[in-house]
């Protein structure tokens, strides 16, 4: 059902039947280490290139999630997946052997929100009994794609984020589980003219603000209606901007706001700058930590808002700005 | 309604309310020149970079399509769009000022099929009264992305295709028009191990074969049920392979098969190798030529099958194969 300007509320809300996550060594040493399904022994995951390593993450996350749901790959009617690499090759090569119809997505680090949104729309409409929504990122493939070769050992400003090595897959369907997606608010691109690709939190905060504000308006809700409002990878710099921007709009989210980029690393001990980032950051944090809290009933309703910075090295080098986008997904606890 | 293994049939079929297209100079000198809405005076479209030129194509196509539909941008509830560039920057920068919720897509040159499929699913489910599905490509931005700088003046094998400079936008909605989308078949990735990025027709033909065969099975139809079966950009090399592969499956599509890549250029006169390619190729050919034929009632039912080659320079340089994907969309003539 269309709600307000940018939102949908699902009359028959799709369930998150299962989810699975896999991360790299650094994530496995961070605050969420006890929650992850698999922590790699090294970040190559048995492959020869970083890109193949990232593809392996998607393959493993999908295989585990399908298994946890008690399904086979052929039970999954559609895959909704994306990653950060040019031409989303981590997705293509990671998922090519499953023979499941694929909708390839690109929303930068907001892709997890986009995949969950489209997956939920698909199940709620009766187009599928079961779909998978997934994303991945890898520190080393992302550094190669967006910044400098690792061997160059460049220095990073404190506002820079650290791309998470990880992938999570979510199986959405009609079978009852402990969590369901009851609504979505799809974001528009917001461009505040920021040109610093090392400060993506600042570039994405306006998009998070815009979609959260619109979500409140569309659903006639406020911060008090959520146990947590969880952005993707704003980091400590972006978090401060988001809270301050939403205060201008009359919403104080400071007590319920969390950011996956802040949760996943211990910034001071691990030297990860402003926080974690990447398509995998919000996905593995939702899968490993927040969904588990919901399944225990410790959170009843959360707003999950992955945030993306829309740039490439080409756009950046041509002097373009870094616009942002974010998509909001309402996840609710299901009583037995 | 789910049909067979990979297909949907829409009980309330969404209409293609309008479409609009804009192309570059070379396309404007080709066989379809009299059908295009706008032919650029040069391929910069008033911009300073090829990427901005491509963004301008999306901006113009969207603006024209919205206008033709008698709508305003704010009447469009969702944008489904993508392009070939790393991190789909042509889409982000082309559409950022419209403030329309965006689902960014990547399916290589199959993206037009993916966008029409998701857009149709969205309207048919009642999630939106009106959405836009669109794609773009630009010869020069694609050469820079995938091959060599234009200044390098490299030679090309005859099997190479020529990226189309162009963009088309399709407004899908509930308002009756002369054409509607009655079904879709969503493709899986097919990888026949081809490693030649200069022969993408051969890399994509197996994916086209797979989705067309599955479409026939799912809908219990055959070539005779279609006035035209139109692939995206297989070119002359890929066309031959597709026809031959489908013959192995017991389907002879030779009399109804057309390929947008072959239609859009006069290969011999224009030196375009095996044919046109790129996200824009199938989009502008459908918008300019085939939809017009349908609106006149000269074709009653077509199967539109954009085809994509899933590679990047990174995957190619690392010795990976070139997998393909294709998505099929059934478009039918609507009686008054």
Image (cartoon, coloured by chain):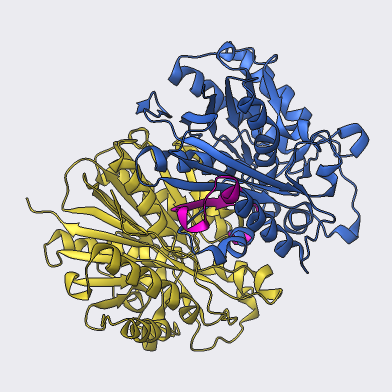
Chain colours: A yellow, B blue
Whether residue A3 can be seen here? yes
Whether residue A94 can be seen here? no
Image point (59%, 36%), residue name? B191
Image point (27%, 78%), residue name? A257
Residue A143 appears at what percent x and percent y? 57, 71
Residue A331 appears at what percent x and percent y? 23, 59
In the image as oriented, which residue stretches furthest toward the left?
A336
Q: Is residue B147 above or below residue A138?
A: above
Verify whether residue B319 appears in magenta.
Answer: no
Residue B297 appears at what percent x and percent y? 61, 21
Q: Is residue A233 above or below residue B92?
A: below
Image point (22%, 75%), residue name? A223
The answer to which of B174 and B79 lies nearer the viewer is B174
Q: Is residue A237 above or below residue A86?
A: below
What stretch of residues is rendered in magenta? Answer: B65-87
Left or right of residue B220, residue B283 in this image: right
**Quadrant of image for the N terminus of chain B:** top left
Count of picture labels: 0
Residue A23 appears at what percent x and percent y? 39, 63
The answer to which of A194 and B28 lies nearer the viewer is B28
- The image quadrant that residue B259 belongs to is top right
Image point (58%, 56%), residue name? A48
Left or right of residue B11, residue B331 in this image: right
The answer to which of B176 and A207 lies nearer the viewer is B176
């Amino acid at each position: 059902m269309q709600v307000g300007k940018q939102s949908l509320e699902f009359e028959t809300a799709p369930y998150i039947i299962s989810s699975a996550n896999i991360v790299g060594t650094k994530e496995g040493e961070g605050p969420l280490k006890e929650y992850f399904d698999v922590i790699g022994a090294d970040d190559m995951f048995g492959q020869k290139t970083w890109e193949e390593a990232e593809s392996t993450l998607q393959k493993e996350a999908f295989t585990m999630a399908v298994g946890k749901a008690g399904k086979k790959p052929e039970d999954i009617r559609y895959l909704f997946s994306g990653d950060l690499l040019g031409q989303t090759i981590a997705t293509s090569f990671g998922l090519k052997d499953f023979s499941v119809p694929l909708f390839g997505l690109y929303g930068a680090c907001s892709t997890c929100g986009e995949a969950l949104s489209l997956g939920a729309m698909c199940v709620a409409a009766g187009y599928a009994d079961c779909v998978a929504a997934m994303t991945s990122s890898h520190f080393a493939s992302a550094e190669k794609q967006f910044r400098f070769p690792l061997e160059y050992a460049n220095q990073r400003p404190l506002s820079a984020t650290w791309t998470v090595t990880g992938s999570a897959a979510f199986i959405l369907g009609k079978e009852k589980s402990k969590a369901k997606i009851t609504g979505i608010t799809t974001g528009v691109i917001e461009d505040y003219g920021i040109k610093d690709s090392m400060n993506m939190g600042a570039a994405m905060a306006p998009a998070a603000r815009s979609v959260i504000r619109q979500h409140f308006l569309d659903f006639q809700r406020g911060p008090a209606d959520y146990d947590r409002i969880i952005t993707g990878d704003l980091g400590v710099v972006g978090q401060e901007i988001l809270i301050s921007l939403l205060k201008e709009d009359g919403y104080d989210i400071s007590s319920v706001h969390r950011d996956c980029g802040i949760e996943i690393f211990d910034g001071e001990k691990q030297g990860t700058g402003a926080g974690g980032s990447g398509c995998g950051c919000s996905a593995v944090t939702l899968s490993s930590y927040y969904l588990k809290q919901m399944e225990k009933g410790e959170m009843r309703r959360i707003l999950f808002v992955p945030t993306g910075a829309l740039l490439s090295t080409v756009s950046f080098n041509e002097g373009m700005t870094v616009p942002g986008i974010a998509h909001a997904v309402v996840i609710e606890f299901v009583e037995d």
